[in-house]
Amino acid sequence: RDIEKRLERDFRAPIPAMPGLDKYIGGGLAGGEMAIVLAPPGGGKSMALVKIASTALLEGKKVVYYTLELSEKVVGQRFDACLNQIKIKDVWEYPDIVRENAQEIDTKGGQLVIKEFATGQATTNTIMAHLRTLEANEGFVPDVIFIDYADIMKPLAVFSEKRHSLTS
């Protein structure tokens, strides 16, 4: 019955995720879409998120990256390494390159906000309140939001089974 509705053109405007991956997921992620990165401990989930967020920054997008495990400084150093193709242990050896590249990203419109919340303390309401504060105080409305370790967010309600808390 809704064939005409399905045949309407959908002008999806995806944000690039990662070169090579984009062709498999239709060009990246668009508004209202969500992606989840799954891997075993130490499998590189956080680094994959930084890489995807870096791709968005290089495209001139506004990015908010919430970290619920690592410090803002550590995540920032990961961005510096990724954006400048430098090993994390060597980031401090190239401060001029890091600064210059950050200015270039800024001229393209790319902006990054990294916000740390203590493990198990942030809720969806905490995230929404922070986003409202960014908009009200700085006029910053992100194009894409990353939540590293969303599974350790504090649920809004208590359930007997972890799977229900994760869904919440």
Image (cartoon, rainbow, N blue to C red):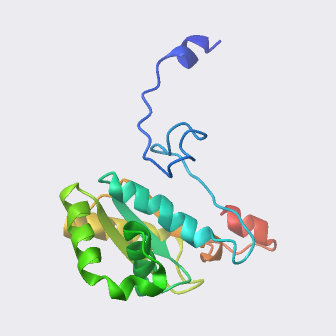
- Name which quarter of the figure residue 78 lies in: bottom left
User: Compared with residue 111, is residue 4 higher up or lower down, i.e. above or below?
Assistant: above
Q: Residue drawn at (49%, 17%), measured in percent from left and top?
A: 8
**Front-lying residue, 56 or 11:** 56
If the image is split into quadrants, where does the N terminus sit? top right
Q: Is residue 100 left or right of residue 14?
A: left
Residue 64 horizontal/vertical position (percent): 39, 66
Q: Residue drawn at (52%, 84%), measured in percent from left and top?
A: 70
- Residue furthest right as drawn: 161
If the image is split into quadrants, where does the C terminus sit? bottom right
User: Compared with residue 83, is residue 11 higher up or lower down, i.e. above or below?
Assistant: above
**Front-lying residue, 62 or 99:** 99
User: Compared with residue 18, is residue 139 higher up or lower down, i.e. above or below?
Assistant: below
User: Compared with residue 120, is residue 1 higher up or lower down, i.e. above or below?
Assistant: above
Residue 75 horizontal/vertical position (percent): 45, 79
Q: Residue drawn at (55%, 70%), measured in percent from left and top?
A: 47
Residue 55 horizontal/vertical position (percent): 42, 56
Q: Residue drawn at (56%, 83%), measured in percent from left and top?
A: 69
Q: How many marks?
A: 0
- Name which quarter of the figure residue 84 lies in: bottom left
- Name which quarter of the figure residue 131 lies in: bottom left
Residue 36 horizontal/vertical position (percent): 63, 58
